[in-house]
Image (cartoon, rainbow, N blue to C red):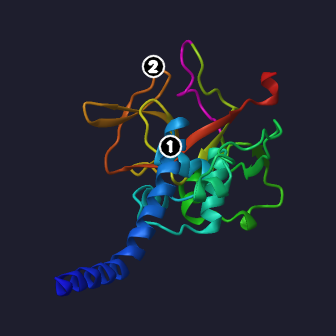
Amino acid sequence: MRFVIDMIIRYRIIAGNTLRPPLIRRVEAMTIALRLRAKMNEKDLSENELGRRSGVPQPTIHRILNGDSSTPRKATVEKLARALGVTPEWLLFGGTQGNVLPASPPHKEAKKYPVISWVAAGAWSQSADVSQLDSGSEMLASDVYVGENGYWLEVQGDSMTPAQGNGFTPGMRVLVQPEGFDLVSGKYYIALLGSTGETTLKQYVRDSGIGYLKPLNPDFKMIVIDGDVQIIGRVVDVKFPNSFL
């Protein structure tokens, strides 16, 4: 009997030393994951949308939510907390305090992005370098963060001007997020047409499993998205020209 008891004790010690640290790390990671998931659900945010707002890559967010990242970097936690309106300490450790940040001033710090040409837009997401811009390049501010490679385009032509209702009229400026965006039917995107080299603004629609670039002006034809079409950015903000006022 004594032998059996000794074996049980020895097994528990060995098992505890072997399994406990990874299990503890897993529980800690899942605790962070549960708090992160709860706030995302509360604010109705997808992984991609949280990534867009926080600047944290979607795969990193996915690993945290799955409990695979037990020790996310301090900068990552701070970005996620800021986007969710909580403190980094609450996101990491929980508790009753810090799950809601104190009310912040109504003004949101804006970031300036360059206004570039439609020709330049085709390659901007791959080789954006603000330092190479001409000193006279126009910079416009927005409180919508679109990453370091974001840019503005000036709307040209009337393909996005509908017969009735709101649209994109010539002279309007659109802010483009060139990285980390979702394809959502009904939203507006910048596309590069490989057959002509043209860069264009269109509405993305999906029907019966096929994607289309849709002009708002019925006088223009829809474009089927095939191997020659590359979606290079999503429109997330607009500015009207001064002449509109």
In the shown orientation, is residue 110 left or right of residue 163?
right
Q: Quadrant of the N terminus?
A: bottom left
Amino acid type of the residue tagged 1 in the rendering: Ala
Residue closest to the far top: 164
In the image, 68 versus 93, the foreground residue is 93
> 54 or 38, which is in the foreground?
38
Instruction: Pick the quarter of the image with the C terminus.
Output: top right
Q: Which residue is mark 1?
A: 38
Mark 2 secondary-structure assignment: loop
Q: Which is nearer the N-term, disc 2 or disc 1?
A: 1
Q: In the picture provided, is 230 more to the left or to the right than 133?
A: left
Find numbered disc 1 in the image and state the secondary structure of the residue it sits on: helix
What residue do we see at 53% from left, 69% from top? 71
> Is residue 221 covered in magenta?
no
User: Observer-nearest residue: 186 or 117?
Assistant: 186
Q: Quadrant of residue 89?
A: bottom right
Residue situated in front as seen by the camera: 80 or 96:
96
In the image, what residue occupies the spot 57% across and 23% down?
Answer: 161
The CA span between labels 2 and 1 is 43 Å
Task: Give the main secondary structure of the magenta stretch.
Answer: loop
Q: Which residues are magenta?
A: 154-164
Q: Which x, y percent locates residue 48?
A: 48, 48
What type is the residue that disc 2 sits on? Pro
Give the residue at x 60% y 39%.
236
**Position above or below: 30 against 184:** below
x and y percentages locating residue 111 in the rendered image: 76, 50
Q: Position of residue 162 (x, y in %)?
A: 54, 18
| Position of residue 72 measured from the top left corner of the image (x, y, whole percent) | 54, 67
Single out the residue that lies furthest toward the front: 1
In the rendered structure, find residue 218 and report the number of the disc placed on it: 2
Determine crowd level at label 1: few under 14, some 14-19, many 20+ residues with C-alpha closer than 10 A: few
Instruction: Residue 19: tell me if it is visible.
Output: yes
